[in-house]
Image (tube, rainbow, N blue to C red):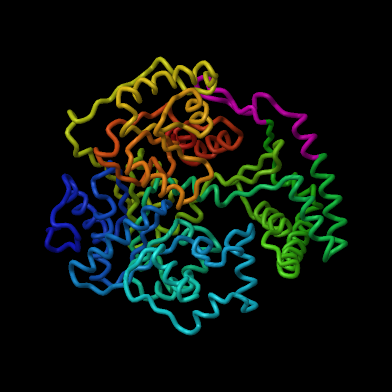
Amino acid sequence: MAKVDLLFRHESFRPGQQRIVTDLWHAVKEGKHFLFNAPTGCGKTDSSLSTALTYALQNDLDVFFLTPKTSQHKVAIDVAAGIAEKFDLHFKAVDFVGKKSMCLNQQVRESGDFYHACGRRSKARKCSFKNNLRNGFELTRIMGHAELLEECDKKGVCAYEAAAQAASQARLVVADYYQLFAPPISQAFLRKTGKDVSKSIVIIDEAHNLPQRMRDYLGGSVNEATFAKAHRESQLFEPELARELSFLQKKFVQFQAVKLESLDADETTAPDGEKPSEKREHRIDKSEFVELVGGEAAALRIAEELEKCGEQYVAKEEKQRSSCLRLSSFIMRWLEAGTEYCRVVSQEGLDCKCLDATGVTGVVDQARSCIAMSGTLLPLEMYRDLIGLDRERTILKEYAPQFPPENRLNVVVDSVSTRYPRRTKEEYEKIAAVLQQVHDALEGKRLAVFFPSYKVMNNVLAQLHLPNAFIQRESMNARETAELISAFKKTRGTLCGVMGGSLAEGIDYSEKEIVCACLVGIPLQEMSLEVQSLVDYYDKKFGRGWEYGYIYPA
């Protein structure tokens, strides 16, 4: 594809970028899916959006740009705005970050049962922001979600509904994965916006995150406290249900104790001598919990009564969280889940874990084209399979780094390890000693250190002296993360985070900000029954159990 034909906001391509654009154009033109792995800094976002928007505007299609990182929303919106300005185009682009994140009512936004609370207030016409939207509000330019929230706050209107209205006329929708893949969010989103996946080009950014993120979303858990809280809530409205829940709580505790007492020490097998999880847990069958609640018919009845009671509780008690609703949702998920789920009882409670999210992610196979991209999307065939794309219709491509090899020095330190058997105070001290040498050699400037987990990071950092460190915390929200990155880039000290986290992916660091990156170990998961079940499931479905379920994702 010639450069002149492309809606490209820059005056020239980065090294290797024109090859990516040409390959993308041929794939989209032929109605193919395109999965590609390309290093950070090669212009993946500009390449994919420029190609997709060029073809979409020519052929009356829509474009979805889906990303798990809030920081990437702004990049995508900047690309769209740059294209519109350069070529004097007047297409609309809308930015979604999820209904909850866009809610301007702080009390409702911070509630545990946000969607029930939002729906209840909206149905009763008690949401002033949504009511005000009936007076009319129109997006007049391309703007990111932060600017949209600020504008809607001034006008006193619901940002999510305003964006949804604008999306119906928008050519580009920038959103989180959930907007397209998470039922019932996705169903409501497509209904409100009037979008049709089959008449769209779907771009999945940081696509290696998609399978795990949606598996986490589709899972659920309950424990003794869930039953106890649901019992207290139901006492206010349904005394008979409350008595039944009290009985079920006792049965659940007994069931949990019996199962954990009969543990088989060899139920999990760790590869290469890795330490199996010390967590006490036991796999159970679907029928065991169903029998505990009195059979399938009784389970359905209890779930319905719990939902009704939970809705009464949040409405009449003006609460924003309900254990009745949580327990109802869990029971329904347990009943509906098939062999793509594993069921585990442990000290923490009862889990229903999703092993295969292709039932929801596979919707992109209906698209005109799906572009899935990342700098860590290897092996490509695994992610094609885990997303659920048609093998015959999918092109896989890996692009080599364009930076001169002599500009990079790779050093492997094999005298330390983060393998589970060696995670001791002594080993953390050894790792810290190596990192301290690197830190001191750079005078603590322009250094990034990424760890396999927060636990390892905290144990190692406790042994280090880093005067100007910027440390990622597990509970950080998007705003706090953005502030941390901004502060680091200004002072250029030592950045510490976890692999796979928001500091390690989707962000471009220049040579003025980072000259050295230390990767402490490999983020292999601790062997658990969920991981073992994943290995078994992928082995049966793809014949690649250990690779797909344990080794490659790390």
The image quadrant of residue 437 is top left
Quadrant the C terminus occupies: top left
Tell me what residue is drawn at x 68 percent, y 33 percent. 281
Percent of width and height locating residue 84? 23, 68
**Number of on-image labels:** 0
Residue 1 shown left or right of residue 195 in the figure: left
Residue sitting nearer the eye, 297 or 64: 64
Depth check, front residue: 271 or 463: 463
* 320, 388: nearer the viewer: 320
Image point 49% across, 79% down: which residue? 133
Residue 553 placed where, x, y %? 44, 37
Dominant SS of magenta comes to: loop
Regarding residue 141, the answer to whether it shows in the image is yes
Q: Residue at x 43, y 40 (%)?
A: 500
**Quadrant of the image containing the N terminus:** bottom left
The percent coordinates of residue 305 (x first, y second) are 77, 64
Q: Is residue 322 left or right of residue 424?
A: right
The x, y position of residue 449, in whole percent, is: 39, 31
**Residues rendered magenta in the picture:** 255-279
Relative to residue 245, is residue 475 depicted above or below?
A: above
Tell me where residue 375 sits by quadrant.
top left
Relative height, residue 491 to residue 109 (above, below): above
Q: Height in image: 539 above or below 235?
A: above
Q: Is residue 269 one of those drawn in magenta?
A: yes
Q: Is residue 553 visible?
A: no
Identify the residue at image location x=75%, y=50%: 290
Q: Is residue 30 magenta?
A: no
Residue furthest out toward the bottom: 135
Relative placement, left or right, of 237 versus 429 is right
